[in-house]
Image (cartoon, rainbow, N blue to C red):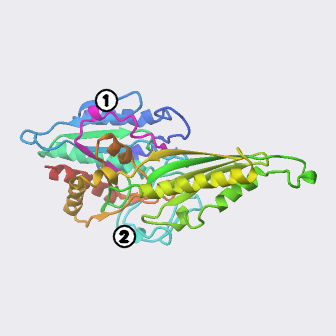
Amino acid sequence: MTALERFLIYVKIHTASSENLERTPTEEREFDLSRVLEKEMKDLGFERVFVDEHAYVYGFLPATPGCEERPCVGFIAHLDTIPDFSGENVNPQLIENYDGGDVKLGESGRVLTKDVNPNLPGLKGHTLVTTDGTTVLGADDKAGIAAIMTACERILAEGRPHGAIAVCFTPDEEVGHGASLLDLERFGADFAYTVDGGELNEINFETFNAASAKWEIRGFNIHPGSAKDKMINASLVAMEINAMLPAGAVPEKTENYEGFFHLTDMFGTVEKAELGYILRDHDANGLAEKEKLMRLIEKQINEKYGAGTARLTIREQYRNMAEKLSAHMEIVELAEKAIRAIGLEPVRVPIRGGTDGSQLSFRGLLCPNIGTGGYACHGPYEHTSAENLDGAARLVEAIVDLAR
């Protein structure tokens, strides 16, 4: 089965996770794909195939004779799609011999354009795979699953010598839970790669350091006719708090290694207001400075309006996996050799976000990320190509071939 054929099966299975649910998986429907993959792995000849109570799928290919001393390489991809945009009733469009131009997405009124997606001309001649404009495609990260499964099938079918290969498909990556319950002992890898988004020639071993910040603002409501020097409008205080942050340090005005404050949600009345932020910085000291600034704002607001007006809660989310990987760059260099082996020139790109590999690296399993050739994830403009899906499978194969 080709990577494209697999991919088109997987994306039809609704696996969107959900925010703010303290269980894993957040949605039982994630098991639907787990069970499909469990059967497929058993049919292909994987050993130690197992689906646990949290929807994690494990499989193992033992080393072939003579390759027992090679390291056990792991590959990880996630089952879920984002909770914010529909992953149900996915109806992909296939455009053979794509001409490199703009693409109408079904009857949705949406158009995939070169202006917004400058990668499109590079896919000219490919079999382009898009949404119909009403759902996500699911390349994030069913492209990774398809690549791993196709690579393993080819290795087995061709009888190629290889070291041990460990595979795990995880739930709830999109809501930050994907690596938390992965059983490292059961998985058994010496090191691993997440196969999750990005250009095929990209290798990612740097992520943001991340925290969330929640503001609760308490106002004082009184009839507006007699409000002078008495009313404290919580919504206006919330606006004041946001105005005290640097205006240029937001996602839409930053790139590369630049961190940001991202206002993700807000609610407000005169009596009560709430603000939700995520704080991001590749440098740990930079994140600490952002947290320090918010604490200073909290202090100043409470001095101005009275103690207890503003309450700030900051929670750490994940850390930059470069802290762990920088001492083991041979794992990154192996991926770079594999990228060259499939005819591309590798590029090291910092992730402006996080991956399962962030948490796994700090849990003791070093885990950079390799690309799948998917684009514009987390929305209706998500797309990939049959050639990129195949290329991602060949990249996984090349890593297995080169691991020594």
Return the residue at label 2.
122
Seen at 84% across and 51% down, the residue is 231
- The one of 220 and 108 positioned closer to us in this rendering: 220
Q: Which mark is residue 50?
A: 1
Q: Quadrant of residue 72?
A: top left
Seen at 67% across and 55% down, the residue is 300
Measured from the top left, where is residue 207 in percent x and y? 39, 55
Seen at 36% across and 59% down, the residue is 373
Q: Quadrant of residue 261?
A: bottom right
Task: Work out how far the residue at label 2 is from the one at label 1, CA to CA, in angstroms.
Answer: 39 Å
Kindly report which numbered mark, 2 or 1, lies closer to the viewer in this rendering.
1
Count of picture labels: 2
Give the left or right position of residue 24, taking residue 373 as reference. Answer: right
Residue type marked 2: Gly
Please report the bounds of the magenta region as a residue range: 174-195
Measured from the top left, where is residue 275 in percent x and y? 65, 50
Q: Is residue 259 above or below residue 396?
A: below
- The one of 71 and 317 positioned closer to us in this rendering: 317
Measured from the top left, where is residue 122 in percent x and y? 36, 70
Give the left or right position of residue 301, taking residue 71 as reference. Answer: right
Residue type marked 1: Phe
